[in-house]
Image: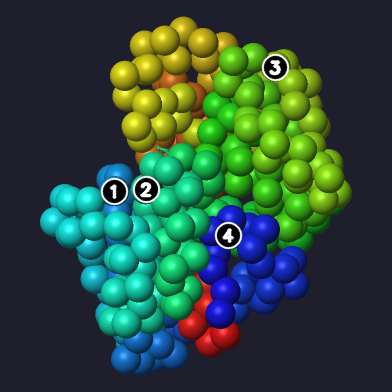
Amino acid sequence: MKHFLTLLDLKPYELAHILNRAFELKVMQKAGKTHHTLAGKTLGMIFDKASTRTRVSFEVGMYQMGGHALFLHSGTTQLGRGEPVEDSARVLSRMVDAVIIRTFDHAMVERFARYASIPVINALTDLTHPCQILADIMTYMQHRDEIRGRTVAWVGDGNNMAHSWINGAVAFGYHLNLACPKAYAPDESLLNKARSLGAQIELTHDIRAAVSGVDLVTTDVWASMGQEKEKIEREKAFSGFMVDSCVMAYAKPSALFMHCLPAHRGEEVSANVIDGPQSIVWDEAENRLHAQKSLLEFLLQQ
Ligand code: CP
Ligand code: NVA
């Protein structure tokens, strides 16, 4: 039995298998072919934070594969009223076949996984968002080819998405350039671990240096969920970190633009970039569905 709390939980060949299968599932779904590979299976979906893409893609994915998903919002569960994580993990393990969790503290998901006897998937924590990277790599492959050996530029906050791109550099073998304001660098131990595992990662404060000649540019909001009170101070710190057409012009002419969404046009990305010809954000959002269906199949067939 395996969990998926970060990209480092699975071997590169397992991730490659999940992505290949995701493309097959996508073809079947587009062709209207029944693919009830998870018939009778159930997925518990614990959410302590808001979501559109993650919730909908997991719930629809389970339905399309013949299974069922239960939306468990913290405001309406005993977990939300303080029932111990360890107890909730053991109880849900007796009732459902897998659990996804979106919460603040990554350690909560780790604790839950330690006491669960079913696969646990990280559906976003303050530390990482690995499901998004599965969809992002699938989307790059859809538009180009293998991402191994390519260069990705991350512009903005050293947040959960940046951390996942860092772990992705280990798992998928791309070079990663991060341009972050000094006070908003990624977690040092996570970065050092990725480097020690062979990832080629440059950290800079200079957007131009980070983006020059890259194959893919990506960014995310300046204030993540839970950081709403820091919005004003973050806007100041991140001024100059918008991905606009001048920034995209440093990248290769063939470079693509991605954003996990939701996006703030005029803050971390200009409207003409996110809505422009280099942007593949809608495919990226759609591929959450296909990549996670494949992930669920993989974890439930272990
Ligand atoms: N990208 C992403 O995870 O979107 P949601 O917050 O809508 O789930
Ligand atoms: N960094 C963002 C990602 C949302 C999908 C957040 O945590 O709010």
Picture layout, residue 12 above or below residue 260: below
On the image, numbered disc 3 is attached to which residue?
A: 205
On the image, numbered disc 4 is attached to which residue?
A: 134
Instruction: Tell me the distance, in whole angstroms, between the alpha carbons under discs 3 and 2.
Output: 29 Å
Crowd class of label 4 (few under 14; some 14 to 19; many from 20; radius 10 Å): many
N-terminal-most mark, 2 or 4 = 2
N-terminal-most mark, 1 or 2 = 1
Instruction: Tell me the distance, in whole angstroms, between the alpha carbons under discs 1 and 3.
Output: 33 Å
Q: Nearer the viewer, residue 182 or 243?
A: 182
N-terminal-most mark, 3 or 4 = 4
The answer to the question of whether label 1 and label 2 lie on touching residues, with beta carbons closer than 8 A, is yes
* Helix, strand or loop status at disc 2: loop
Image coords of residue 216 (percent x, y): 68, 41
Picture layout, residue 65 above or below residue 142: below
Q: Is mark 4 within 8 Å of ligand 1?
A: no
- Give the amino acid at mark 3: His
Instruction: Tell me the distance, in whole angstroms, between the alpha carbons under discs 2 and 4.
Output: 19 Å
- Give the amino acid at mark 4: Leu
* Helix, strand or loop status at disc 1: loop
x 14%, y 56%: residue: 76
The answer to the question of whether label 3 and label 2 lie on touching residues, with beta carbons closer than 8 A, is no
x 69%, y 31%: residue: 188
x 30%, y 57%: residue: 84
The answer to the question of whether label 2 and label 4 lie on touching residues, with beta carbons closer than 8 A, is no
